[in-house]
Image (spheres, rainbow, N blue to C red):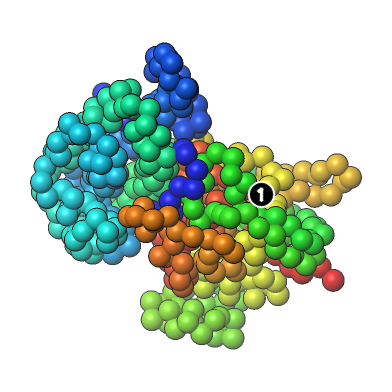
Amino acid sequence: MRQAANTALQDSGAPEPMADKAVAESPVTESAGLPAGGNDPDAAQRRRLHDAFVAVRARSLTLAAPLSPEDMVAQSMEDASPAKWHLAHTSWFFETFILQDHDPGYRVFREGYGYLFNSYYEAVGARHARPRRGLLTRPPVAEVMAYRRHVDQAMEKLVEAAPLEAWLQIAPLLELGLHHEMQHQELLLTDILHLLAQNPLHPAYRDSAPDEGQVAPPLVWCDYDGGVVEIGHDSKGFAFDCEGPRHETLLQPFALASRLVTNAEWLAFMEDGGYRKPGLWLSDGWARCQAEGWGAPLYWEPKDGGWTAMSLQGLRLIDPDAPVCHVSFYEAEAYARWAGLRLPLEAELELALGNATLTGNLLESDVLAPRVAPPVTTAQGGLARPSQLVGDVWEWSQSPYSPYPGFRAPEGAVGEYNGKFMCNQFVLRGGSCVTPQAQLRASYRNFFYPHQRWQFTGLRLAKDRQ
């Protein structure tokens, strides 16, 4: 997906339904069963990462289980990749950055896979063009699954047997690889949604009953005093390199909306001509809106005087109280301007996230769709607290994705993971309904280009306090 580690940091059996597996756990932080390593001072870390590897690799197969081989090969657009490619690429990552460099006895599964399944690592070598991944009908899905088993078996043996000196080099790469695969689990779901949305039959990735009868609470404002605050990762546990260094930044007093913008509120923007008024839009956004004929969020379709939207559960009527989803930065910024407000800064969202419990409607909830906001709660002193800071939809900020003061990309190929993308993209915070729990920290920075809409992206409003 995108993002390298600044700290140290499963194919097994047939996939089971997601709700039946231990995906409610945070696989990179939970630990169980590798035997203790005698005098190895890192035995506990080996157990944790061994169990995390098994769990993360198994969950990728669980997510792919509802797909047919035909589903897994097709590519619906340049930004998306086939599910088969995601499963192979995440295996290539472990093979390339760990097994080939740190296991003298390892033999690559098949020559040529490095070319097929490299994503963007220039230092590793040439690669198959991204827009043409859907043309890779071979290797077949069954061979990719065999590739995963080959890599998994070698990785588990290496984690158990690597000498301590080698393990100290392997551990941070292994943890990075696990978080990398979790990012691809999210991408697998968003990419398959985009693919299924191209089908006139509107097939569902998985059937499930929608929430019914929930009403969004009124929007209220949650005040923050601002001042000099610290943001960025605190060096405790895993983080991607772009989340640091931790540093001070100045925030003026501000307020955040207590919940996300809803479909009903977005419909009001549409009915007021929001997609037809150039004065609401940034110039590049208006050009994109006109060129692509935007008139509603991605996947929305008019029907019988109302609106439906394609989802992982198939075509559904729009729930007016659920958060609006699949809108670009350009659309979010235009909506905020129409409302007489603005998008938050990423530092404002991080400040709010730092005081919140980092749980919400994430992948482990097994809903796979944004949910209606809960009632407003208050903190000590009676001040309103924002809800939906975690999960449901990624929240656009107005902050460009750029390096923090003192940022230095790691040396080597893994240094290409984040730093080279710090141009022309915007930061999002908080995770979505398809983000694994273990991915999230208050400092986590997601980023996409301002025109992109296929991710579970929405918005929360902000304003300056006078």
In the image, 226 versus 219, the foreground residue is 226
Q: Name the residue beneath numbered marker 1.
A: 353
Q: Is residue 256 left or right of residue 97?
A: right
Q: Nearer the viewer, residue 202 or 386?
A: 386
Left or right: residue 60 compared with residue 381 = left
Residue located at (20% from left, 63% from top)? 129
How far from the left and from the top, in percent, is residue 45? 46, 27
State the residue in front, 50 or 76: 50
- Residue 335 is at least partly visible in this image: yes
Asked whether 288 or 58 is in front, the reply is: 58
Amino acid at pointer 1: Leu
Residue 292 lies, in percent from the top left, at: 38, 76
Q: Residue 321 in the image: x percent, y percent?
A: 61, 53
Q: Is residue 9 left or right of residue 170?
A: right
The residue under the point 38% across, 41% down is: 173
User: Which quarter of the picture shows residue 361?
Assistant: top right
Q: Position of residue 100 (x, y in %)?
A: 22, 41
Element type at mark 1: helix
Q: Is residue 269 visible?
A: no
The quarter of the displayed image where residue 374 is located = top right
